[in-house]
Amino acid sequence: MTVSEAAEQVGLTTYTLRWYEQEGLVEPVGRDSAGRRRYTQQDLDWLILLTRLRRTGMPVRDMRRYAELAREGDSTLAARRRIFEAHRDRVLARISELEEDLKVLNYKIEVYGKMEQEPC
Amino acid sequence: MTVSEAAEQVGLTTYTLRWYEQEGLVEPVGRDSAGRRRYTQQDLDWLILLTRLRRTGMPVRDMRRYAELAREGDSTLAARRRIFEAHRDRVLARISELEEDLKVLNYKIEVYGKMEQEPC
DNA sequence: GCTTGACTTCGAGTGGGCTCTAACTGGAAG
DNA sequence: CTTCCAGTTAGAGCCCACTCGAAGTCAAGC
């Protein structure tokens, strides 16, 4: 799979895909005879996981740290689990926060609706 | 209330408070005889609303638009309600997304836990 | 009356995460 | 054989949202 196909599959641009590789979030992708990147399904799976971490707000720095651990093999399983647990807690906190803010948003919408009907 | 007191109350820095004013997210704050900002409770309430919009992911650009509408008075009530409704939908979508990603995170944690116990 | 310290403005700097340009290369289609 | 297109690299540029530095002002405490 070429870089542009991979980009489409995972919802990133080719720029970003190359940048992720350069930043060490992805181990060097295999090349064809002409030196062009060829993405395997494994590469895609990894990228899809990364996009999930990314959009749940994990900084690139932390994703790199996680990628480094993953490259080190099974000895880092526990460390990786702890990273995920900590991150899960942050995501949970974020969801609660959003739900709190949502209440205010809904209240505001309601008030606006009322004010439109019977202006004070 | 001084700028630093206000900053502490709303959880922003004094830099950010001044910058928000400069960017038109806040209408010019009243000054004392020495030209120093004096924040009223109204100012604080507005800032707290802004921080909620901000942390639910509304871009500063959109917050400015909303602030402009608010300054124009009651004629923009419906427009402001629509902004909030659109934003609420985005927040809801964001929460669903986070919950999806949370599932993957939990699955990963489980798998890591199992692999730690009985390595393959 | 002098020092201190919190304020003022203006403009420059920072960090994160991409995003793009320039110059080049290699393989496929006509 | 030429054209074309999708790749390649290194490095610069961009956008966002702050964040800070410099230089100056003012009022309160000693």
Image: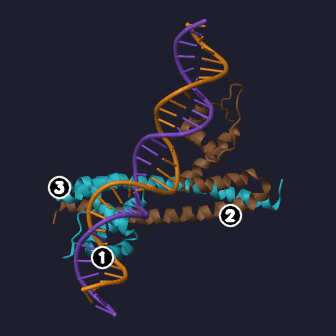
Chain colours: A brown, B cyan, C orange, D purple
Query: x, y percentage for residue A39?
Result: 67, 35
The residue marked by circle 2 belongs to what chain? A
- Vertical placement of residue A84 versus A39, above or below: below
Measured from the top left, where is residue B45 in percent x and y? 30, 70
Q: Residue at x 20, y 59 (%)?
A: B71
Q: Same chain for labels 3 and 2? Say yes or no.
A: no
Given contact means CB atoms under 8 Å apart, are the residues at marks 3 and 2 in contact? no
Badge 2 is on which residue? A82
* Depicted D19 relative to depicted A25: above or below: below
Residues at marks 1 and 2 on the same chain: no
In screen coordinates, is B111 left or right of B46?
right
Label for residue B2? Answer: 1
Of pointers 3 and 1, the one earlier in the residue sequence: 1
Which labelled disc corresponds to residue B75? 3
Kind of residue sitting beneath label 2: Arg
Q: Amino acid at mark 1?
A: Thr
Q: Kindly report which numbered mark, 1 or 2, lies closer to the viewer in this rendering.
A: 1
Find residue B76 and report its image quarter: bottom left
